[in-house]
Amino acid sequence: MPLYMDRHDLTNATASDVAMAHMKDLEVQAKHDVRYLTYWFDPSASATFCLVEGPSRDAAEAVHRESHGMIAQTR
């Protein structure tokens, strides 16, 4: 399956906030045939990056939408 990386600009987020959001992604990922592999949090840039394997960008976004609602930036 293809790999995707997304970026979230999360002002005032902490490492704990990001870890909890990632755990929520893991709870629902199978429903969307997606596998969240890892994430990176850069507090100095207020940014989080997610690496995901799945059938489409839309499937990866559906996981975020269902699990916590923090949709990635589209630039």
Image: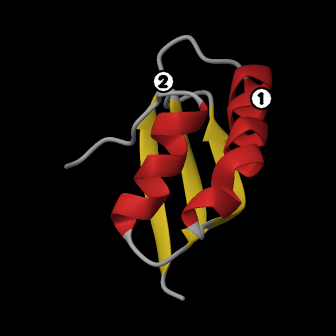
Residue at image mark 1: 20
- Give the answer, above or below, for where 56 lies relative to 5: below
Three-letter amino acid code at the position of disc 1:
Met
Three-letter amino acid code at the position of disc 2:
Leu
Cα gap from disc 1 to disc 2, whole angstroms: 14 Å
Q: Position of residue 22 (x, y in %)?
A: 71, 41
- Quick one: label 2, few (<14), some, or many (20+) residues within 10 Å? some
Extreme residue in the bottom direction: 1
Extreme residue in the left direction: 75
Q: Which mark is residue 10?
A: 2
Q: Which mark is residue 50?
A: none
Q: Nearer the viewer, residue 28 or 68?
A: 28
Occupied quadrant, residue 56: bottom left
Quadrant assignment for the N terminus: bottom right
Q: Residue at x 31, y 41 (%)?
A: 73
- Quick one: label 1, few (<14), some, or many (20+) residues within 10 Å? few
Q: Position of residue 68 (x, y in %)?
A: 57, 28
Count of numbered marks? 2
Q: Residue at x 47, y 16 (%)?
A: 11
SS for dot 1? helix
Q: Nearer the viewer, mark 1 or mark 2?
A: 1
Q: Position of residue 25 (x, y in %)?
A: 67, 45
Q: Nearer the viewer, residue 41 or 59?
A: 59
- 53 displayed left or right of 19: left
Q: Residue at x 51, y 42 (%)?
A: 64
SS for dot 2? loop
Q: Residue at x 24, y 47 (%)?
A: 74
- Give the answer, above or below, for where 29 lies relative to 24: below
Q: Nearer the viewer, residue 11 or 57?
A: 57
Extreme residue in the top direction: 12
